Image (cartoon, rainbow, N blue to C red):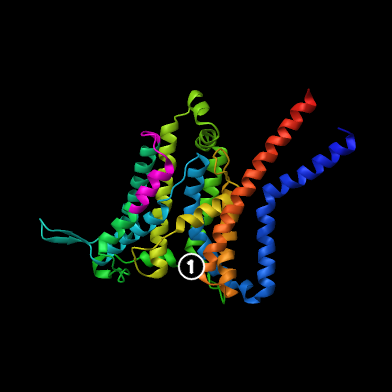
Amino acid sequence: MSESTKKKFYQTDGFRMFMGKYGIGVILIFMILVIGVMKPRFLYPSNILNVLTQISVNCLIAYGMCLCITTGGIDLSVGSVVGLVGMIAGGLIQEGLTLKFAGVTLYFSVPAITVICIIIGIIIGIVNGALIAKCKLAPFIVTLGTMYIGRGLANIRSGGNTFSSIKGQEALGNVGIMQFDSRVFAVGGFPGIPIAAILFLILAVIAAFVLKKTPFGWHILAIGGNEKAARLSGIKVEKNIILVYAISGACSALIGLVTMAQIAASHPNTGDTWEMNAIAAVVLGGTSMAGGVGTIGGTVIGAFVIGIINDGMTMCGVSEFWQKVIKGLVIILAVLIDQFQRNLQAKMALQARNENK
């Protein structure tokens, strides 16, 4: 191979590698500019804050999903956990917990309900992780099963009805759930930043640090890259997988509380198909469905892309049905890009080895 040919090869593949790594960010900027030109009100501060609220919910679910996919697994139960936790929390606020044998009804404070719900999310995650890690069941099948179980239990909790009185009563000491939908830093005409956005930013920093700078994060990447090699190197594969799914369950439970406050009610179908948005955000952000490669920063950008697609298409009058079609195509495209990038990396590695001989 001549020097000019080599130079052309590396320039071309270098550009492709750049687009494979940063292309989603370029697409995000392009989308914002195009939609902003077509619909100027898209860039109004009030609309940006609304989009940020939607994106924050998707991000908080996607963090746990990112960890699961990085290990080579997946968690399809996240949306059902959102709905189930919302129904449990709404029921505890509106009806309390009746102890028939004692003839009393207990009402819990919002902090206690928050802890209870997050523990429930963690338990569901541990069950998922144990079945996957200990029983060697396929993550897709396990979490598909718990997805149906969770959605069924959410409907059973209220007979399919909605809990609409979730603000609580001062006399019962169960007020405060609406704080999950409050805003901070409201000054003058600025409406303030949603609590959900603050949570998503804080957890993004924590999750990125954990994944890239801690032994736990390195173990997750190693398990996804080669589980057998990770086990031989002394990594406790089962323990780490269970912990990953427990984190995913906790994230979903937190979103269940946030969403309940945002809609001021608990509905058993809340969170339906949200796992699809989370998967789309993770894959668009550069996390490999094959495992071993994960990025929280990319997941955040992917969530922004999904959120802007939703809001932009709504503003442009695209029906909800076509939005689903487009999001499905986006997921397929993201997987194709991921596969292309992996093939390109293998090609460049082979080229480098041949030149060193």
* 142 inside magenta stretch: yes
Q: Which residue is mark 1?
A: 183
Secondary structure at numbered mark 1: strand
Q: Residue at x 36, y 34 (%)?
A: 135
Q: Residue at x 84, y 36 (%)?
A: 6
Magenta segment, which residues? 133-148
The spot of residue 131 in percent (x, y) is: 36, 38
* Mark 1 Cα shell of 10 Å, populated few (<14), some (14-19), many (≥20): some
The spot of residue 27 in percent (x, y) is: 67, 58
Occupied quadrant, residue 133: top left
> Is 327 on the left or on the right of 152, as rendered?
right
The spot of residue 128 in percent (x, y) is: 37, 43
Q: Main secondary structure of the magenta part?
A: helix
* 147 inside magenta stretch: yes
> Is 345 on the left or on the right of 209, as rendered?
right
> Is 102 on the left or on the right of 86, as rendered?
left
**Is 85 drawn above or below residue 351 in the view shown?**
below
The spot of residue 208 in percent (x, y) is: 56, 46
Q: Quadrant of the C terminus?
A: top right
